[in-house]
Amino acid sequence: QVQLVESGGGLVQPGGSLGLSCAASRTIFSIGTMGWYRQAPGKQRELVAYISRGGNTNYADSVQGRFTISRDNAKNTVYLQMNSLRPDDTAVYYCKADRPGTSNEYWGQGTQVTVSS
């Protein structure tokens, strides 16, 4: 069973930066698209950004220009660099990975990001 382990969450002041990473392990196949989602209290989980294995990216309008997603295929790891953070970025951030050619998807346990002064 594929495991996704996120790291890098924490508390940051508005306008600050934070980086997240997510490593996939126990996989015997190549990971397909990887992405970051977030869920704030009382809200539905929403897409933040995703990146294909070939490097094509897509961002939510709310983070465009502030967040950057990247990946290292050799390490089965995806990253999210978050700049100019705002209080409304506060949420639990989840990593997701897809298995190519299937409907299988895998989720991490989530990491808390809090933007507050």
Image (spheres, rainbow, N blue to C red):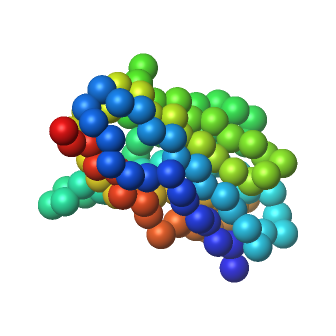
Is 60 placed above or below 96 here?
Answer: above
Farthest-out residue, bottom: 1
Q: Quadrant of residue 60?
A: top left
Q: Residue at x 64, y 72 (%)?
A: 3
Q: Looking at the image, can residue 105 be seen?
A: no
Q: Residue at x 47, y 69 (%)?
A: 109
Point out the image quarter for the N terminus.
Answer: bottom right
Report whether 92 appears left or right of 86: right
Q: Position of residue 50 (x, y in %)?
A: 54, 41
Report whether 83 appears left or right of 98: left
Q: Position of residue 5 (x, y in %)?
A: 59, 65
Q: Residue at x 68, y 41 (%)?
A: 71
Q: Position of residue 47 (x, y in %)?
A: 40, 46
Q: Residue at x 42, y 32 (%)?
A: 17
Q: Nearer the viewer, residue 29 or 85?
A: 85
Point out the image quarter for the C terminus.
Answer: top left
Is 62 placed above or below 24 here?
Answer: above
Q: Looking at the image, can residue 68 be seen?
A: yes
Is 45 placed above or below 63 here?
Answer: below
